[in-house]
Amino acid sequence: MNNINVTRSSMPPFEEYCEEIKDLWDSRWLTHEGAKNKQLQAELEHYLGAEHIELLVNGHMAIELSLQAFGLEGEVITTPFTFASTTQAIIRSGLTPVFCDIDPVTFDLDPAEIETLITPRTCAIVPVHVYGTVCDVEAIDRIAKKHGLKVIYDAAHAFGVTYKGCGIGSFGDAACFSFHATKVFHSIEGGGACFHDKEFGEKLYRLKFYGQSGPEAVVDVGTNAKMHEFSAAMGLCNLRHVDEEIEKRRLVAQRYDEHLKSVPGIQLKAAQEAVRSNYAYYPVVFDGEIFGADRDAVQAALKGHNIMARKYFYPLTSAFACYHNRFDPAQTPIAQRISQQVLTLPLYPDLPLEMVDRICEIVVNCKV
Ligand SMILES: *Cc1c(COP(=O)(O)O)cnc(C)c1O
């Protein structure tokens, strides 16, 4: 039997993609802001409700180059409860991460704690909309304005999420999406940074194009982070189906909820008011003592049935070996506890509901 993985890439009909890439054999324009890039950019601005979006080779470079395009220096307040990319982008940009604890219900940065970590060296806040749950964008905006800080959201999990009817990419000075193959919407590999400020956009564009401002002028120390046309074509196809895919995800998540919502010792992702969710992930927090089995035991039981649930996110990024104990994960005790108790169950649009039933049966039977 094939493994049931935590996620599975959405694919458009094969013929639709072939049709979409046909033009490329005529144009011979395969990258460098070609027609597919331009079309995807316009369609994503519309879909995401973003003023501007710059397309990039992946979500990681959207974060890294956004940090660099703001010319930031000093300390960045951020969460350790995230994928490696967020923290690596901060450190690779020569900035110092200052880890802030998370809210135990939303798993996103706790705004009250952000304020206590601000120093004269703080230049920005990098929150993550973890699992697509919306950060307290209003409180974060207030804090940032009061202290003159930039806000760069890692919105890699939040494609298609809206808050009070506004696209999640419209919040912050920049919001960075990942269009990686495993995400709700993808262009195989890819990413995008949403922003408001045109000057920032020009700098971001130069940074992804080797720092060039013209054929004979290089004004920034840039890199190569362009999206190519075959990726953009995949994005155009997937965008046509993304709403159906999100609806299918909703049904899967609802089925999980039905089985798990009243089980003692299990905490689920809380529904948020005024939020249109994208059902990107299905994290479950196990309180081992109440539930009767700990997270690792549940993961092992599922693995015994070829069901590959994942520890998103464990360990905390502040505990990574590459940082040589520079940070103390114990300083964010809630994040530390959640990272030790959380297991993300398989969720993708065509996961059969009977498989959800089976997964839940295995989970519930772990209780000793
Ligand atoms: C996927 C992801 C990224 C990085 O995106 P890529 O497109 O894979 O480079 C960054 N942050 C988070 C939280 C992610 O899940």
Image: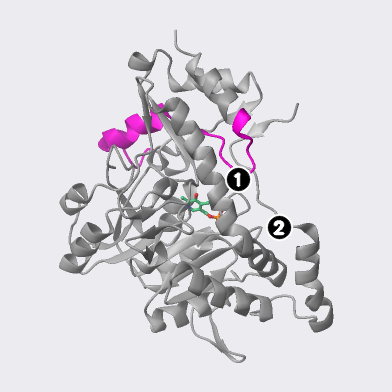
| In the rendered image, the vertical position of residue 261 relative to residue 144, given as above or below | above
Estimate the x, y position of residue 138 in percent, counting from the top left: 23, 60
Quadrant of res 25: bottom right
| In the rendered image, the vertical position of residue 76 relative to residue 227, given as above or below | above
| In the rendered image, the vertical position of residue 89 relative to residue 193, given as above or below | above
Q: Residue furthest right?
A: 25
Q: Quadrant of the N terminus?
A: top right
What amino acid does circle 2 point to? Pro
Image-based side of 266 in relation to 240, left or right: left
Q: How many marks?
A: 2
What amino acid does circle 1 point to? Pro
Residue 349, which numbered label? 1
Q: Circle 2 sits in a helix, a strand or a loop, which is it?
A: loop
Estimate the x, y position of residue 157 in percent, counting from the top left: 47, 52
| In the rendered image, the vertical position of residue 336 relative to residue 145, given as above or below | above
Q: Residue furthest top?
A: 368
Q: Quadrant of the C terminus?
A: top left
Start-end of magenta stretch: 325-354
Q: Residue beneath label 2, please?
A: 12
Estimate the x, y position of residue 308 in percent, counting from the top left: 60, 30
Q: Residue at x 83, y 82 (%)?
A: 26
Magenta span includes 229: no
Viewer-proximal residue, 6 or 338? 6
